[in-house]
Image (cartoon, helix red, strand yellow):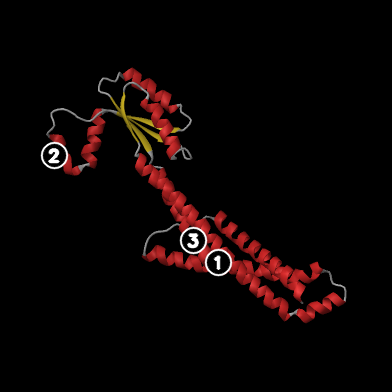
Amino acid sequence: MPYALREAVVAYNIRRTMERVESRVEIVAFLRDDAAPNAVELAQRDIASFPEVLSVYYISRDEALEVARRDLVEFREVFDQLDTNPLPASIEVRLKPGQRGPAAVRAVARRIASYPFVEEVRFGSEWLDKVFLLRRVAGAATLLLGGAFALVAALIIGSAIRMAVYARRDEISIMRLVGATEGFVRGPFLLEGLITGVVGASLALAATYGLYRVLSDTVLQLEWMPRSWLLAGGVAGALLGVLASALAVRRHLREV
């Protein structure tokens, strides 16, 4: 269980990192020098009406040069010596959350590229593909490792219940002799599994939080899981305990 929670912390931080990276996804359309201002303004309104689009910004040639001077400090002298501005005007388009995947970005980029005054459209296709590939790989790895740790925890709980059944076989025999139903006999073991799952999840949560604090204070800044994830972890621990107990009791009660 502690390992599963650690994987959850890692998965959540990877997810948050990917969300921050995805929030920077944008489409830049470079305009021709002879682009008519009225046509560009109409295009901005049209692009802003796309269901995937969050915002549209027009960057003039002068503004593009100022941005280049500010961001590319090592080339500032070169820009100052220019007789003419070589940078084109552009339209920067940002997409809504949930619309920043490769397919959505490419679809919007193709529509923007269809305007006759657009010379080139860029959105970092290779970089975007790698980001989403990393997200899918991280998600698959988290599910795989989480499932493996859950299976190990279930086996441990099942083994503990099996030993409890064998240790109380005399009591179980007496209960059956006096007419106890199978549900009544199984009840204490299911309750024990539930308590084991809840206590195990709580201890794992405490240990994981301690490790999280140590790493955040000494190595790198991490984000703690939201309450919904913590609640889901506690419920999962309880259900895992009950399920593992039920399977173990069902199997081993037949042998006593």
**Front-most of 183 and 248?**
248
* Residue 148: mark: none
Where is residue 246 drawn, in percent x and y?
71, 66
**Residue type of the residue flagged with mark 1:** Met
Judged by depth in the image, the label closer to the viewer, 3 or 2, is 3
Residues marked 3 and 2 touching at CB (< 8 Å): no
Quadrant where the N terminus is found in the figure:
bottom right
Which residue in the protein does label 3 denote? 7
Report whether residue 115 is seen. Answer: yes
**Residue type of the residue flagged with mark 2:** Glu
First in sequence: mark 1 vs mark 2: 1
Position of residue 27 relative to residue 172, above or below, is above
Calculate the distance from the C-alpha at mark 3 to the C-alpha at mark 2.
49 Å
Rate crowding at label 3 as few (under 14), some (14 to 19) or many (20 or more) other CA atoms within 10 Å: some
Q: Is residue 48 found left or right of 76 in the rendered image?
A: right
Which residue in the protein does label 2 denote? 77
Which residue in the protein does label 1 denote? 1
Rate crowding at label 1 as few (under 14), some (14 to 19) or many (20 or more) other CA atoms within 10 Å: many
